[in-house]
Image (cartoon, rainbow, N blue to C red):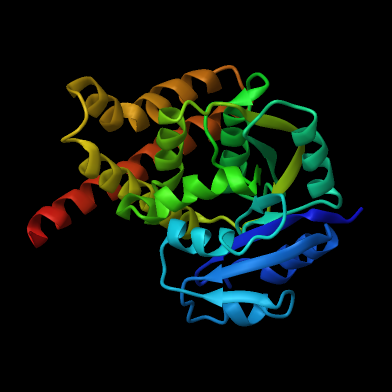
Amino acid sequence: MSCSEITIIVNTLNDTSRNLDQFFVSLVRNKPAEIIVVDGQSNDGTAEIAKKYTNSVYVTGPGISKQQYYGVKRVKTKYLFLVATDIELPDDTLSKLQIEFENNDCFAVQAKLKVKMERNFFEKGKKIFLDFLQEGGKYYEFLNGPSLFITKKYLPIIKEMANSKVGQGYAVDTFRTDILKKKKIYKFLRSKFFVFQNEKLNFKSYAEKVISYGVGDYFYYNSNKSKWSYVRCLKSLTHVFNKYIIYFPCRSIFRRDLYIAIPFFWLTALLRYYGFFKTMLFYKKSK
């Protein structure tokens, strides 16, 4: 089924460690109106691979929200779909998400994530994490995965994000959620349909990603602490501890794979706090 009302937006930056050909083939098979790739000056040939699948490849300065805004401004269709290069779309995903959007009252529809391979500790741990993260009712509390939006409604959101330093790093999902909450936008529909998380995980790749989230946590906290109350600051500082040291491990006690789940969540917390405090110390020394 052709998805002539949907444009796909992809941010890239040195992504050749992922299976880019498989990723782009899955996008093309969904038959969108256009695939727009905004590359943040990759030096590993990422943009060249993208050009095999779309003529709309742009190279800009790096920055997650700036890159995304650059792409969204060029969308001509009613809908846009945001997706990262570690995802693989089953056939007809876009058309199914569009039907869900049109049949529900929502600001966005987020596809469910399913780990494609469970070959080692990290991929099995990621699968457990997604199981917990995607539980719940009709709506998600926040957006952090492949999502479909109405273009004209998302444009002012990403414009605001692009004009902030906080919107350029790994705290981008938290930043977007806060902006949406301030605008009283809450309805992020939990799709019935899934896409594959198609990324080879090992200690090095997983640690790099989670440490980057810790770096994003620090910059988001540091940019907001003067405006926040004491309680809000404390919540920001302890949310990783509460989720990954206490909540998820406690939820894992009655699972058969608890011997994977609990160490995985504790390791995730350790790596994320390492990224946070290492950045804090470096940032203070550099002043």
Report x, y in % for residue 98: 79, 41
Q: Is residue 131 above or below residue 285?
A: above
Note whether residue 121 is visible: no
Q: How many marks?
A: 0
Which quadrant, please, contains the C terminus?
bottom left
Camera-side residue: 209 or 52?
A: 52
194 with respect to 176 (left or right): right
38 with respect to 216 (left or right): right
Most extreme residue toward the right is 1
Report x, y in % for residue 27: 76, 61
Residue at 78% over, 66% down:
25
Report x, y in % for residue 232: 26, 25
Residue at 26% over, 32% down:
237
Q: Is residue 90 above or below residue 204?
A: above
23 with respect to 11 (left or right): right
Q: Is residue 116 above or below residue 235?
A: below
Camera-side residue: 185 or 247?
A: 185
182 with respect to 45 (left or right): left
Q: Is residue 169 above or below residue 187?
A: below
Report x, y in % for residue 113: 67, 41
Q: Quadrant of residue 61?
A: bottom left
Residue at 35% over, 44% down:
272
Note whether residue 138 is visible: yes
Residue at 70% over, 78% down:
55
